[in-house]
Amino acid sequence: MIHKQFKGVVLFFFFIGIGGCQVYHDITSQYNAWFLANERMTEVENDLLYNPINNYSDVLQVLATLDTNAGKARKADMDYVIKMASNPIQYHPRSKWVDDCYNLIGKARLYQGDFENALRTFKYVNGNSTDHNARHTALNMMMWLFIANNEKANFEQVKTYIQRENKPFSRENILFYHLINAHYYRTEYKLEYAAQHLELALAVAKNKKQKTRLHFILAQIYERTGETQKALSHYDKVLKLRPDYEMRLYAKSMSYVLKNYKSLDELQKAEKFFEKKIKDDINFDYRDRLYYEYAQMMYKVDSIDKALQLLEESIEVSTKNKTQKAYSYLRKGEILYEKKNFELAAEYFNKALADLPETDRRYASSKEKAEVLQEFVTTLKKVQKEDRLLKLARMSEEEIEQFLNAEIEAEKEEILKKKEKERLAAKKLKRPVSLDSTGSSLPSIDKKKENVFPLYSEELLAKGYTAFIKKWGNRPLEDDWRRSNKPARFAENPERESRENENDRPSSRSRNNNSARKPKESDDIFASVKSLEERKAEIPRTPEELETSKKRLEEALFPLGKIYCYKLKEIPASLATFQRLFDEFPNSEKTPEALYIMYLICYDFPSCNAETYKNLLLKHYPESFYAKVIINPNYIEEKNAENKFVEAQYKKAFEHYKEGNYVVANGILQQLQKDYPKNNIWDKIVVLQALTQVRIDGDLINYFLTLDDFLEKNPSSEIKPFVEKLIKSIPSEIQDKALTIKRAKQLDNSNLQN
């Protein structure tokens, strides 16, 4: 009996000992290792993951894009995490915190770019751990890894695996799961899916700063998907959570852009908000974005001209945010495009691409449109240039001088306006000084008063600057600027001044004249303006020059019409351009195609009649390819079959030629020229027939004349180099005789015509 009681006591203390040992391993692992490693990892993640750079020009990032270089820069922290997290794995393998330590090691490897070992670690935890929270953390991190490594298929595979998981996730893992998915879909610009995950993340988020950011991102997404009321609701929630000043400013301004204004008072209230914020010194670096949003609001209420003006202000005051500047350029280009001001739109699209990052989602489409606009502008300028020259060619000398002088003055005026604009824009970039060195307020200048000191008035300064340039040109800022002979000035260091100016003055000049250095040629702001004589020299005068100018105009009109039609979708302008080509250049090789395009356009464009252009094509160009296509819808198929037959016969003739059957080969080629004079390989047929003929009759003179005539009439043929080699192989004396015969025939033909 005593023995049995003793045995029970022993067993009791044995199990207590085992349990106490487990508690020891767990507590030691948790507080001596895992806690310290986790605290350091949390610090790193808050910096690398949860603190993305805010680009308010786009939908804000949910999580920061994983930057392995930044992770490597935190190598000391990562080494500390790995060292501390390794202790429980090595010395307390029975602890329940071992799996959490493995996850910390996997994160440290991931953030430093060691994807292979990080993935192996997370897979180990998922496959071996009995702790569901640790497994779920590992699965989340695997999704994050596949996003960072751009493995979309693997990301979707892990996501599907998680969705089939039957063990409940902790709040932290639910939150991170939805944040990862929202980040992924935001990056892929699948905003509807991103919004779904953000809404679910908000339901479990507790951190006020995080909730504020998620509300803001949702507002941006709903704004872009056209769900205005949802966007306004989330912006309102952002403001209620009292975010930092920058986010509060953008939330308020974007709310004003989204509102539907039912009265003029509401609109004026919104305008006053923007104008007040723009003038406030605290918003100096935000002015570009405020002007941009203000412009968006004015565009929405159909105040297009004011929207364009505000976008220009946004561009001028932009100081640091190049992406925002690019968006302002881009938005102005888009509005100008809508207004069909394609020339100016091209300028703004090009400027936008200079500042827009290539990684931006709008870069590819903007570049494509910019290329179309640039092609249009280049082609249009060719047409405008020749139109101008031909117009000048029809004028009298007096009219020419009057026209060109007016042109020169207009260009100079434009340069002056540009200089004035640049000067005023530079002033806008200077921070306002509201307090002097003593801390007292500086006197304000009331610009509405009549008697304003000129140096305080921007308007008077601008007018004075323009008037000065017009009268005196771009003079250097120096004493006695109006005098041609300036008095000598005493230099502080005559020897030094002499050395510095030695190369700037001719030895024959006097000392007095040397002190007044002539402005450099680069100082002339009108240096780019062509002189009257240069412009006159460009005018076509002779019949040959006029014909060349008309030819350039003809060659530019057809591509211009195609750009209008296919790339800009400007059907009326396309029809007008093609019609001009038909009216002014009916003999152009492109005119039949232009009429055919007009014929096709009018099937879908109700204001013109397709039959009109069909009849013109059939009447004036009945033998053209396009006329035959209209007459016979099967023409292309039949022509292709014909070309295949001709090619087969040509190959047959070539085989006979190689075998020495020259008569047979020549007969086949003659028959092809007779039955199918217009085929795809007619040039090859002509040259092969010349080769077979010379083999038959040995007439080298006729052989040379055939080849020479071919080159003269077909300078762009693909087989031109081969024909030139054949000609070089003909003896020079034969060539001389042949050319003499050719010149004699040309002379006889000329005499007959006379």
Image (cartoon, rainbow, N blue to C red):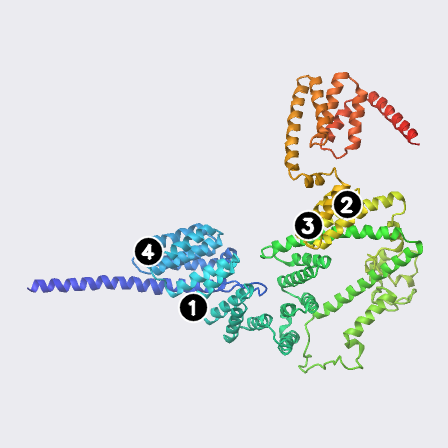
What is the distance, in whole Å, between disc 1 and disc 4 at their CAs? 29 Å
Asked whether the viewer can see residue 685, the reply is no
| Labels 4, 3: front one | 3
Alpha-carbon neighbours of circle 4 within 10 Å: few (<14), some, or many (≥20)? some
| Residue placed most toward the observer, 364 or 502 | 364
State the quadrant of the N terminus.
Answer: bottom left
| Residue placed most toward the observer, 686 or 527 | 686
Q: Where in the figure is residue 503, as x and y percent of width and height?
A: 85, 56
Name the residue: 29% across, 61% down. 25
Asked whether the viewer can see residue 17, the reply is yes
Q: Say whether disc 1 or disc 3 marks the residue closer to the N-terminus.
A: 1
| Circle on res. 555 | 2
Above or below, comparing residue 634 to residue 121 in the picture: above
What is the distance, in whole Å, between disc 1 and disc 3 at their CAs? 55 Å
What is the distance, in whole Å, between disc 2 and disc 3 at their CAs? 21 Å
| Circle on res. 203 | 1
Element class at badge 2: helix
Residue bearing the label numbered 4 = 129
Q: Say whether disc 2 or disc 1 marks the residue closer to the N-terminus.
A: 1
**Contact? badges 2 and 3 (CB < 8 Å):** no
Element class at badge 4: loop
Q: Amino acid at mark 3?
A: Ile
Above or below, comparing residue 675 to residue 35 in the picture: above
Q: Where in the figure is residue 517, as x and y percent of width and height?
A: 86, 61
